[in-house]
């Protein structure tokens, strides 16, 4: 008889040969444990993926602001950086975030990154109802939860 679990002698086995393999109960228990671990780990993994893409978008917004300030020449030239929601200097995937620069009423400009639903970025837990993050010329950011404030 094997003590390492490599084989078993079965009482009903008349030829007394070692039987190798797993029983159906052992397989079912293993699958149940795997399902529980997957049920907990996968949603957490997806949230971390969303968070990493959010961090890239935040970095891109700061890069846009830097480029606007660096290139200031009696006015900001938005169209050279962002056109039709696509940023020419950004690392973010266009399927995750759409960028927009608008002239503000009380500040010079507002940079806005809107999460896109095609990659489920809109399910990011820090985003408000409008699913966007903003940064204005004065450095004011929203929502605070996304910016780590």
Image (cartoon, helix red, strand yellow):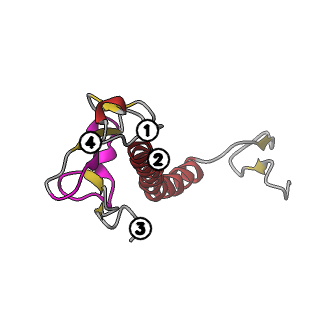
- Of the numbered discs 1 and 2, the one sitting upstream in the chain is 2
Label 1 with label 3: CB-CB less than 8 Å: no
- Of the numbered discs 1 and 3, the one sitting upstream in the chain is 1
Sort mark 3 into few (<14), some (14-19) or many (20+) by Cα contacts within 10 Å: few
Please name the residue shown 43% across and 49% down the image: 46
Please name the residue shown 36% across and 40% down the image: 73
- Of the numbered discs 4 and 1, the one sitting upstream in the chain is 1
**The magenta segment:** 106-131
Q: How far apart are marks 2 and 3 (CA)?
A: 14 Å
Residue projecting furthest to the front: 74
Residue designated by label 4? 101
- Of the numbered discs 4 and 3, the one sitting upstream in the chain is 4
Q: Is residue 140 above or below residue 66?
A: below
Residue designated by label 1? 92
- Of the numbered discs 4 and 2, the one sitting upstream in the chain is 2
Query: Which label lies toward us, 4 or 2?
Result: 4
Q: Where is residue 27 in the image (x, y as percent from the top left)?
A: 57, 48
Label 1 with label 2: CB-CB less than 8 Å: yes
Residue projecting furthest to the bottom: 149
Label 4 with label 2: CB-CB less than 8 Å: no
Q: In which quarter of the image is residue 135?
A: bottom left
Report the side of 37 relative to 8 (left or right): left
Residue placed most toward the observer, 148 or 12 = 148
Residue designated by label 2? 56
Question: Is residue 33 in the magenta section?
Answer: no
**Tag 3 secondary structure:** loop
**Tag 2 secondary structure:** helix
Residue designated by label 3? 148
Residue placed most toward the observer, 10 or 102 = 102
Q: Identify the image quadrant of the C terminus.
A: bottom left
Q: In this view, does 20 lie above or below 146?
A: above
């Amino acid at each position: 008889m094997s003590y390492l679990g490599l084989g078993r002698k079965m009482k009903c086995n008349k030829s007394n040969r070692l039987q190798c393999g797993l029983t159906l109960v052992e397989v079912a228990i293993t699958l149940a444990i795997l399902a529980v671990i997957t049920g907990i780990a996968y949603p957490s993994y997806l949230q971390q993926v969303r968070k990493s893409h959010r961090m890239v978008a935040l970095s891109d917004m700061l890069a846009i602001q830097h480029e606007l300030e660096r290139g200031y020449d009696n006015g900001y030239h938005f169209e050279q950086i962002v056109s039709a929601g696509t940023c020419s200097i950004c690392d973010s995937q266009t399927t995750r975030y759409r960028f927009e620069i608008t002239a503000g009423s009380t500040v010079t400009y507002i940079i806005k990154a809107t999460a896109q639903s095609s990659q489920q970025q809109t399910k990011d837990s820090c985003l408000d109802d409008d699913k966007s993050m903003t940064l204005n010329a004065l450095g004011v950011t929203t929502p605070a939860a996304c910016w780590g404030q």
